[in-house]
Each structure stands twice: as C-alpha cells, then as structure tokens.
Amino acid sequence: MELITPGLGLIFWMTLVFLALLYLLKKFAWKPILKALKDREDAITDALSSADKAKEEMKQLQFSNEQLLTEAKNERDNILNEARKIKEKIIDEARQKAGEEAGHITASALENIRNEKMAALTELKNEVGQLSLEIAKKILQRELSDPKKQQEFASQLLDEINLN
Amino acid sequence: MISVGIMRRHLKSVTTFIFRTAILVLVFFLFQIPGSTASAQDNVNLVPASDSAFAKEHKQKKAESFNPGDMIMEHVVDNHEWHILEIGHFELTVPLPVILYYDGKLYTFCSSRFHNEEHAYQGFSLPEAGPDKGKIVRTSAIPAGPKVYDFSITKTVLAIMISALLMLLIFISIARAYANNRNKAPKGIQSMLEPLIIFIRDDIAKSSIGEKKYEKYMPYLLTIFFFIFLNNILGLIPIFPGGANVTGNIAVTMVMAVFTFILTTVNGNMHYWVDIVNTPGVPWWLKLPLPLMPIVEIIGIITKPFVLMVRLFANITAGHIIALGFISLIFIFGAMNAALGYGVSVVSVAFMIFMNLLELLVAFIQAYVFTLLSALYFGLATIEPEHH
C-alpha cells in the first residue's frame, strides 16, 4: 500500500524543494538562457538578412558597373561613328566646295575670256570700221568725182541695205 | 543465522553489481563471477549443518529472506536510511534525519536510533514487518494518541534535494556560459542541453500554447522537464547520487501534477470555463435537464492531472520492478541449483541490459509526455475563442 499512498512528509518536502527550485532556476537560469537564445537567434537572423542585403547590393553594384561599362562602350562607339561621319562629311563638303569653287573659277574665267573676247572683237570691229571708213572715204573721194558713178553707188548701197 | 545474514547481504551486493553492469557489460563479467563463486561456497557450507533445529529455523528464515516481492518493494519505496553499498561484511548505509510532528511537538533525531531490538526510540517505532512496515508510528506499548506526522528527510527527499542542487549547478553554469559567450556558438554542457531547451520551447511550448503566451510558462515547463528527466536517469544509476526512485514515487508525481492543475485552473480564461459549463458541439439534451456534459467536463479537469501523476509513477516504477524482477530470477533459480543460477544470470543480465536501454528511452519519453501534456493543458485553458 505504501507504494500508491503519497506520504505527507514527502509531499511537503517535494513542494518546498520544487518551488524553491522553480524560483531559483527561473531567476538565475531560465530567464538569462532564454533571453540569450533569443538574442542569438535575432543576431543570426539580422546577420543573415544583412548579408543578403549586402549580396543584393553587390549584385546591384556589379550590374550598374556593367551597365556603366556598356554605356561607356556605346558612347565611345557613337563618338567614333560620329567622328567618322563628320570626317566624311567634311571631306565631302570640302570636295564639293572645291568642285564648286573650281566651277565658279572656271565659269568666271570663261566669262572673262568671253568678255575680253567681246571687248577685243568690239575694238577690232571699231578699228576695222574706222579703217574701212577711212578706206571708203578715200575710195569714195576718188570714185565719186563723177555724178554718174555717184548715182550708181547710191543705188547699189540701197540695194545692199535692203538685203541686210 | 550468520550465514543467512551473509546470504542476504550478498544478495544485495550482487544486486548492486548487476545494476551497474546494465550500464557496463564488461564490469559485470569481472565482478559477478567471483561473487557467484562465493555464493556457491556458502551453499556448500550450509549443507552439513542441516540436521538440527537451527537448520530448520534457518530454512524458514531463508524462505522469508528470499522473498523477491519484499526485495523489490524495499528498492522501490521510500526509506529512512540510504543503503549505499555492501561488500562482504562492509556495509555503507547513511542514516537520515527523522523529523516528527506529534501532539504539538517537533521531534528530531537520527534514524539510526531505531537500530535496536524493538526498533523504537522516544516512544516512536519503525517496524520492519507488519501493516506499518516502513512507517514511523507510536510504539504499540503506549496507548493510542493523535496521529504522527512524519516530515523526515527520507531517501527520496534527499534525492530530490540532490537533484535540485545538481540542476541549479548545471543550469546556472549554463546561464553563465550564455552570458560570457554572448551570441557565440554553445560549448560543452551548454551545447548538450541547448537542443533540449530549444526543443521544449519550439516543439512543446510554442506549438501547444501558442506564439503569444508561451513565454510565461517556459520556466515551469523547463523545470518539470529537466527535473523528471534528470531523476529518471538518476533512478537508473544504481550508485550513490542515483538509485532513489524519485519519479516513481507517487507523492512526487502528485506534487508536479497538482502544480500543473493549479497553473491550468488559475490561468483558465472565460472561454475555457464557458466551454466546460456549456460544452460546444453536443446536443442540448446532454446539457439541459441533467447537466451530463458539464459533469463529464468537470471530472475531466480532475482526471487530467490524475492521469499525469499515475502515468509517470507507473512507468518509472514498472521499469524498476522489471529490472529487479530479472535480478530476483537469478536468485530464485540459484536457490534451486547453482548451475541453473549461472545459466539464468546470463539471460537475466541480457534482458536487464535491454530493459535499461528501454528505460533510458522511457526516461526521456515520460519527461517529454509530462511536459507536453502540461503545455497542452495550459494551451487549452488559455486558447482564444475563434471569431466568426
């Protein structure tokens, strides 16, 4: 019967010791242990999340670096292309301008030549006319001493004028 | 008479040996064989003297002394002295203080005072047989007076105190390790017990009580878990600080079950009590004219801690009884025939090793179950009503 009959003294001591144990452990063991565990878990979680963040940032940084590099490359290519285009354009323009200038020069030279020619021709004509007049005057002075011949000549001149 | 005493003491010493060997098989083979040889010699010496009245008395005594039931009970129940070991004639027994409250007065003396012919001192006696065996009562010669209240530091009380001190030592040193080792990986005993602490927190408290309220119950749950676990383990160790049957004592389990009951009842919210009086989900006629369900629920409040108490007590005591039963087998068969005793001892020891391994598992499972069920009861008492 003793096996299944709880003894009074034992109940008393067990209650006393257990309560004391519960109080002391709660104060000096469980609270600091549980707090330390929680703190450590929080610290680990924080560390992991910040590591993740750092990784993400690294990735972002790398990405932006690459982007920057690509942009720089593109820029360089663009600049080079532009430079090439400008060069070609300048050359083209220069060539064109040179051609035009040459054309102009040629044209004005031709014009000058023509003008000079015309002037020379006019002068020549004038000279020739003067000479012809001189000659004609002399001839006429000699020929037209006779009135008959004068008549003849006058009609001949008239005819010629009509033909013109 | 003398050889009976030797036999008896011898039986006890071998018992201690075999208990040890359940943990260390090798040690068994070193000690058991010389021990059994001695027992065989005792038997041989006894035979020539068996023609007198002394021998008859001896045989009678022998039959009495060989009662395995008594031997097992002696090991399982509480005691006023702590029998630590016996080797041959050398006996180491620690007498424990007796504290009695009788008729308004406190009596304190050493339990070794009872070591006399009448087993009596100052009008109190500790009978070794009869209905009051193991209990301190008024000596039968004195007319019956008021009841004797026994507040003695018994073997179990001392074992409780030792285990409480051990727990303080272990867990305060762990707490210090946490303080010194802030946010670092645990070391030594700290890393051994940390998984258990986290297991209780995450798998018992959090899952049974809930994320919001579990923190309040953690100190209690951790204390009962480690108290039960440590005492279960100490109960399996046959040498000094262990060997007491603390968690297999119904008074101890009763106190813990009562604490769980008090915590459940004190912390029960409105929803808990309303559900008891007006049980949801049952037809009204189970509640109205005759409050059947409320009665069942109220009985349930009491049976929950009662079952906690009985489960732990029965499991641990049963384990001890089985282990002691296997030892008894050796001596029962050994009394018939020495060779048979040897043969059976091999089987018995094999079974005891198996039982001890099983008990190691039971030690954990019972601590776990007690803690888990306590947590579940707290969880049930504090559950928030569902909002529809």
Image (cartoon, coloured by chain):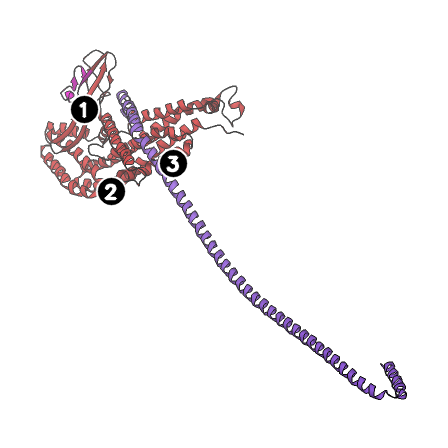
Chain colours: A purple, B red
**Which labelled disc corresponds to residue B188?**
none
| N-terminal label among 3 and 2 | 3
The part of the image, by quadrant, that contains residue B17 is top left
Give the CA distance from mark 1 to mark 3. 42 Å
Task: Let me know if residue B118 is in the magenta part.
Answer: yes
Is B65 situated left or right of B230 in this image?
left
- Judging depth in this view, the residue of B85 and A48 nearest the camera is A48
Location of mark 3 (residue): B202
Chain letter of mark 2 equals B
Amino acid type shown at disc 3: Asp
**Residue B336, position in %: x, y?**
19, 37
Location of mark 1 (residue): B96
Q: How crowded is mark 3: few (under 14 residues within 10 Å), some or many (20 or more)?
A: some
Foreground label between 1 and 3:
3
Instruction: Look at the image and give the residue range highlighted in magenta.
Output: B107-124
Residue found 46% across the figure and 55% down from its top: A66
| N-terminal label among 1 and 3 | 1
**Which labelled disc corresponds to residue B350?**
2
- Judging depth in this view, the residue of B139 and B46 nearest the camera is B139
